Image (cartoon, rainbow, N blue to C red):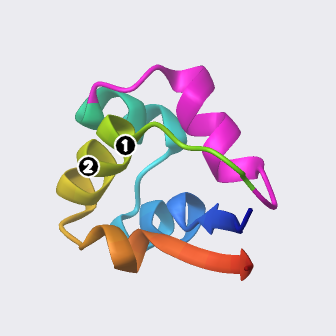
Amino acid sequence: MGLIRLKVRELAAEKGWTLKEVSVRSGIAYGTVRSYAHSPTLATVDYTALMKLARVFEVTIEDLIEVVEE
């Protein structure tokens, strides 16, 4: 199973947003946003959350994800 990392912190920094602002703007619980932002690797991610994050950052899902291990 591959592992990924979400570029939440980097994209939030580019926008000048806090993780709390990302949570409010995306409608995703703060704990989830924080977990995605601080996890060095993830095995599973909620696809709906990926879509919401990509939409709020105005990027594609591919731009949001970094493959860490295949």
Amino acid carrying mark 1 in the image: Tyr
- Name the residue located 71 percent from the left edge and 51 percent from the top edge: 43
Instruction: From the image, tell me which residue sits under label 2.
Output: 51
Horizontal and vertical percent position of residue 40: 81, 61
Label 2 with label 1: CB-CB less than 8 Å: yes
Q: Main secondary structure of the magenta part?
A: helix
- Above or below — where is 5 with respect to 20? below
Q: As rendered, which of 20 and 44 lies closer to the eye?
A: 44
Q: Is 69 displayed left or right of 35 in the figure? A: right
Horizontal and vertical percent position of residue 1: 74, 62
Q: Is 24 displayed left or right of 39 in the figure? A: left
- Above or below — where is 12 with respect to 35? below
- Name the residue located 42 percent from the left edge and 69 percent from the top edge: 64
**SS assignment at label 2:** helix
Examine the structure image and report whether residue 36 is included in the region drawn in magenta. yes
Q: As rendered, which of 44 and 14 lies closer to the eye?
A: 44
- How many marks the image carries: the answer is 2
Instruction: From the image, tell me which residue sits under label 1.
Output: 47
Q: Which residues are magenta?
A: 27-41
- Quadrant placement of the C terminus: bottom right
Q: Is 51 displayed left or right of 30 in the figure? A: left
Observer-side mark, 2 or 1, equals 1
Q: Quadrant of residue 16?
A: bottom left
Q: Quadrant of residue 6?
A: bottom right
Amino acid carrying mark 2 in the image: Met
- Name the residue located 30 percent from the left edge and 37 percent from the top edge: 48
Q: Which disc, if any, is residue 68? A: none
